Amino acid sequence: MFTNVHQAIKLSDYGRLKNTILRTTALDFAENALAVFQLQAEHNPVYRRWIELLGLNPAKVSSLEDIPFMPIDFFKSQSVSLFSASAPEQFISSGTGGYGSSRHLVHDVNFYDEVCRTIFKSFYPQKDEFFIAALLPSYLERSGSSLIRMAQDFINHSKDGDSGFFLNNLEELTALLTEKKKANVPILLLGVSFALLDLAEGYPQNLAGSIIMETGGMKGRRKEMIRSDLHDILKTSFQVSAIHSEYGMTELFSQAYSKGHGLFECPPWMRVSARQLEDPFSSVKLGKTGGLNIIDLANIDSCAFIETQDLVRLHKGGCFEILGRFDRAEVRGCNLMVS
């Protein structure tokens, strides 16, 4: 375990790895992933203990298929980090599921900003030209949200001075959206699902040509619905041909984006796979439902190999579709760590 980021840069290949992550390609993904695995297996006590409990020898891990994924719930009970020093910041999940909040210790928040900007600009090259309206009330009402950090950074870099957050002032937001559309200003309306539904029902309007992007989640404010039904309502109310989506979480530094049809794409340093529901160490073929495993090399300071509780269907070309979440059960990883 390193004391801090400064020590890590001086005493290991950590610095070299971190500098190459955002330049990762399909050709060197496996090499970089294995290097990050060896770094974390040695210096992350929580991940190292998990590997030990699985009876694996890190020295014998020589392919992506051999890398073990750590249950995401460890972020609720453990300090998942390469560093012993206190983190200057942390991202905290909402905990709306009733099972406690996750904590992602952030030792380099500038790197998080760089990751988010790089990903978003690769999907939306006109990023800084947007009028950005962030409709994220449930996130604004608490501290430690990684999504708020990302949205704030995008707003700060927007060339439109009216970009900003909107809480309950939907009438003001509607007026601004109308004004921007008339002026042919590109619009990005980024919102949590329930807030976009509130806007769609109370203030339907013609936003054709705009990007409407949902970040998922009813956060206990509304009844959960499948993504396709949500998108149909939003498309009708805002007169757009597709609803975009962002897939991210407290426990990840990276995000995946969908430009429609609920199919998400990853940045080059992020890769997803599916595990069997009954046997988490066996994989699932394309088109079949499984548990979502994620490799996010931008998680170099914590753990890059995450076994999530989301249900997924993989598609060709590395795309994936989120189908929902596991029915809650005792998490095997947490049981092992306690025992």
Image: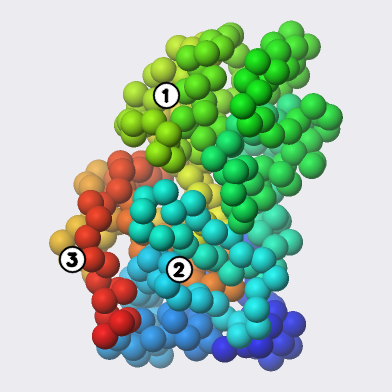
- Pointer 2 with pointer 3, Cβ within 8 A: no
Please say if 258 is above or below 286.
above
Report the side of 120 relative to 153 (left or right): left
Residue with the mark numbered 1 = 231
- Amino acid type at circle 3 is Asp
Number of other residues with Cα within 10 Å of mark 2, as a class: few under 14, some 14 to 19, many 20 or more: many
- Amino acid type at circle 2 is Phe
Q: Position of residue 138 (x, y in %)?
A: 54, 40
Using the rendered view, name the quadrant where residue 222 is placed: top left
Which of 218 and 250 lies nearest the eye of the viewer?
A: 218
Residue with the mark numbered 3 = 279
Please say if 82 is above or below 165.
below
Q: Return the disc, 3 or 1, that comes first in the chain's sequence.
A: 1
Residue with the mark numbered 2 = 75
Q: Position of residue 213 (x, y in %)?
A: 54, 31
Q: Quadrant of the C terminus?
A: bottom left
